[in-house]
Amino acid sequence: MALNPDRIGREFYDQLRRHYSEEEIVELGAFIGFNIGYHTFFGTLKFYPMFSPDGRLVTQEESQRIYGAEPVSLTKA
């Protein structure tokens, strides 16, 4: 969705409508948009993920040891 929005078409929304109302689809879209936005912003601040791959809450220092010298942004993933 974030990297190739042209791939999202009518079929995608038809499938969503099988499970969600229009209001819920808009809310889901807003949630996704906010998450992409704040993760992009956090990347500029060099914030690291709060959780390790196994789900543990970790400090920024431990996260840096786990994920490397620079956090991977959405566009680099």
Image: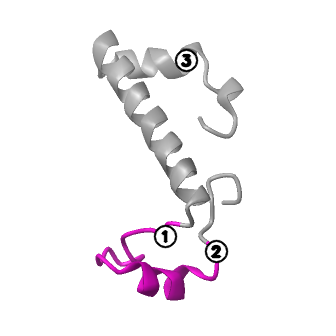
Determine crowd level at label 1: few under 14, some 14-19, many 20+ residues with C-alpha closer than 10 A. many
* Residue at the disc numbered 3: 11
In this picture, is 23 found above or below 44? above
State the residue in front, 62 or 14.
Answer: 62
Instruction: Look at the image and say whether residue 75 sits in the magenta stretch.
Output: no
Left or right of 20, for residue 52:
right
The answer to whether residue 21 of the structure is visible from this angle is no
> Comparing marks 1 and 3, which lies closer to the viewer?
1
The residue mark sitting in front, 2 or 3, is 2
What residue is shown at x 39% (from left), y 77% (from top)?
52
Question: At x 45% / y 85%, what residue is drawn?
Answer: 61
Q: Quadrant of the C terminus?
A: bottom right
- Please, what secondary structure does the residue beneath circle 3 have? helix
Q: Position of residue 46 (x, y in %)?
A: 57, 66
Q: Quadrant of residue 50?
A: bottom left
Q: Which residue is mark 1?
A: 48
Residue 3 horizontal/vertical position (percent): 68, 40
Question: Counting residues from the N terminus, which is met first, the one under dot 2 or under dot 3?
Answer: 3
Q: Could you tell me if residue 47 is visible in this image?
A: yes
Amino acid type for the residue under numbered disc 3: Glu
Residue 54 lies in quadrant: bottom left
Residue in the foreground of this view, choosing between 50 and 53:
50
Q: Amino acid at mark 1?
A: Tyr
* The magenta segment: 47-70
In the picture of the structure, the residue carrying the numbered disc 2 is: 70
At x 51% / y 56%, what residue is drawn?
42
